[in-house]
Amino acid sequence: MPAGEERDVTATGGDEAAIAQQRRLVTEIPGPRSRALEERRRTTVAAGVSSTLPVYVERASGAVLVDVDGNSLIDLGAGIAVLSVGHAAGEVVERVRAQAARFTHTCFMVTPYEGYVEVCEELAALTPGSHEKRSALFNSGAEAVENAVKIARHVTRRQAVVVFDHAYHGRTNLTMALTAKNMPYKDRFGPFAPEVYRVPMSYPFRDPAGMTGAEAAARAIDTVEAQVGAGNVACVLVEPIQGEGGFVVPAPGFLPALSRWCAEHGALFVADEIQTGFARTGDWFACDHEEVVPDLVTTAKALAGGLPLAAVTGRAEVMDGVHPGGIGGTYGGNPVACAAALGSIVTMRALDLPAAARRIGSVIGERLTKLAASSAAVGDVRGRGAMQAVELVRPGTGDPDAAAAKRVAAACHAAGVVVLTCGTFGNVVRLLPPLVIDEALLGDGLDVLASAVEALTA
């Protein structure tokens, strides 16, 4: 957009805006056309690529998906936290159209373009800390994490990488090594990259009663010092709120203590904000909640409103410590994806999506708290902003109940509400609605979820 030009920013764009923001089922889920497409898929798509809910989407807008059978589903997954600005967000759609008409690719490493620079300027302004920053752009969250580790090892001249129980960082060989959960991410895909060390996470629901964040951090640090050695640690890599691991929110004080330890021992503190970043938790970044300033931040998912774009952003002296040509990639910072990111960030600011996430979190938190009080199957509810979850257990115990999570998700899907499961034990139902969802639609989705959970012990 030219300097000084003003444009109304909306949550939807083009013809997609005509989609009513309401749940409406006209067939069973999945419907006949989706089932037919699923049969076609089996003859050409690798079985290892799975789908949570095999309804084939034809259109989408805001927080509603319309499938090929004409069903309108409430999307409480947002493409795994990608569509924070909603499906078909107007500013994203228009900028993508305009950029695609100009050029779709040159490779920034060959002939650069302004959009890449603009995205890096926005990242410098938005990520935690007031220090001078640099960014490098990539295609996926896993690429961003892998490059953050490369940068940390190169600059510190150390090799060891510290990660945490329940962590998820991607599916490449290195990021599988960083990821904790075996199935489906790691099983029989080894051997994995070396010099990765796993330590305990702060998990308040499963930690000893009363353990503080500082105590949990001391437990992790003691393990590092005993088993790795502080002088060997290139970086400590942590999700400020764990995503695939179960939406685990560490106890207050855990992240600041880790950050301080890194600063004291010459290791880099790397925050994986791929799922938590860009307004999801009620702040621009989850680290902002405790004023933690990472040395490096990895971002992706919500950054580009549905297009593949990721970044590593960090202290200038760290990022510039890598020799020219040491990081990059053919498609990294693709111009169309950069245009989408700029449109996404404009929308986040214009609609104040951090505030929207806080409002959504208040609504979801109140409903889940009531649900926990009425259902013995609910062991814990947790989250921050529009990143909330319910952990299901066998009634009367704290034992994880993955089967219950599957039943709840299946019931929601059959009723036209897209929810996701997660957790090391597969027993967590997570909610990641688009931050533009209206309260009535959110309430309808939560009603469906509550009914599914209550049915577990009916």
Image (cartoon, rainbow, N blue to C red):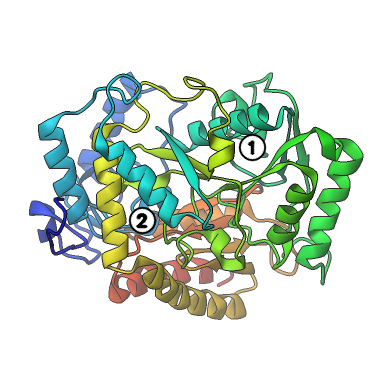
Q: Tag 1: residue type?
A: Thr
Tally the marks.
Answer: 2
Q: Position of residue 198 (x, y in %)?
A: 76, 40
Q: Describe the element under mark 2 as helix, strand or loop.
A: helix
Mark 1 vs 2: CB contact within 8 A:
no
Splitting the image into 4 quarters, where does residue 280 fall? bottom left
| Comes first in the chain, label 1 or label 2 | 1
Q: Which residue is drawn at 45% across and 65% down?
A: 386
The answer to which of 312 and 388 lies nearer the viewer is 312
Q: Position of residue 399 (x, y in %)?
A: 73, 58
Residue 455 against residue 183 in the figure, above or below: below
Amino acid tagged 2? Ala
Residue at the disc numbered 1: 179
Above/below status of 153 relative to 422: above
Per the model, the C-alpha gap separating discs 1 and 2 is 31 Å
Q: Is residue 413 visible?
A: yes
Q: In this view, does 36 lie to the left or right of 362?
A: left
* Secondary element type, mark 1: loop
Give the percent coordinates (x, y) of residue 427: 61, 54
Image-based side of 55 in relation to 212, left or right: left
Residue 30 appears in the figure: no
Q: Nearer the viewer, mark 1 or mark 2?
A: 1
Percent of width and height locating residue 223: 86, 45
Disc 2 target residue: 414
- Residue 211: name its quadrant: bottom right
- Residue in the foreground of this view, choosing between 100 and 202: 100
Which is more toward the observer, 368 or 95? 95
Crowdedness near tag 2: few (<14), some (14–19) or many (≥20) residues, C-alpha within 10 Å: some
Answer few, some or many: residues within 10 Å of disc 1's Cα (few below 14, many 20 plus, some between 14 and 19): many
